[in-house]
Amino acid sequence: MKIVVSAGPTREKIDPVRFLSNRSTGRMGYALAEAAAALGHETILVSGPTALAHPTAVRFVGVESAAEMAAAIKREAADADCVIMAAAVADYRPKYVAAEKIKKSGGSLTLELERTEDILATLGAETGGNCRRILVGFAAETECCREHALEKLIRKNLDYIALNDVSRSDRGFCSENNALSIYARDGRCLELPLASKREIAAAMLEIVLTKPTVRNQSENEEAMQ
């Protein structure tokens, strides 16, 4: 199979020396790419800026901004069998990027932000091309976690969504460990208890690659209620 994995944060420029970003380290996405390659799959890792070494046996595509990640993911997804979006892609970017460093003044500074493209929603909405590819998203949540994850699963027309409760200090961002609740389009929920991200990645791939689900069926949406 050809598997595309995204990882890490994106950086959205404010001026030549400043940017907006988030706390993602990329460890979960890198672990998924390593696990996919270990299983013998053709694996492409599209990564934002991280401090991690590039996994071996993986084709690495480095990006910086959400727009760059969207372009790379859509290009690689055109003939992919599975896309796993583990990256923490910025939802907003500065509408205007200053050509020179913004100097501080005595007053406040207001930044106008605009939405970035929702990459998974774009892939999920496609009706032509490779419609049989498996689409997997991540939901990093801090409250009403299950409700938010299920809403994203349906709205973005995914096969699976991995709920990551980042309000917990023992998992998620900046941690070597993780625990996931994986919700399937057909109503299943599979729990992956706290373990190393390498172990979580292997278990997650076992689920999404060998337990197929079906998208675009209203009865599946009703099962999630």
Image (tube, rainbow, N blue to C red):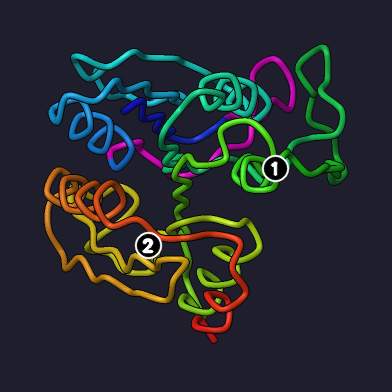
The residue wearing badge 2 is: 164
Residue denoted by label 1:
127
- The span shown in magenta is 11-27
Q: Is residue 124 above or below residue 169?
A: above
Label 1 packing within 10 angstroms: few (<14), some (14-19), many (20+)? few
In this picture, residue 91 sits left or right of residue 224? right
Question: Does 19 lie within the magenta span?
Answer: yes
Location of residue 32 by image quarter: top left
Front one among 69 and 217: 217
Q: Residue at x 42, y 41 (%)?
A: 84
- Quadrant containing the C terminus in the rendered view: bottom right
Q: Amino acid at mark 2?
A: Asn
In depth, the one of 104 and 94 nearer the eye is 94
The relative height of residue 168 versus residue 109 in the rendered view (above or below) is: below
Q: Is residue 82 above or below residue 16?
A: below
Q: Which mark is residue 173?
A: none
Residue at image position (40%, 64%) is 163
Q: Amino acid at mark 1?
A: Thr
Magenta stretch: includes residue 191? no
Q: Secondary structure at mark 2?
A: strand
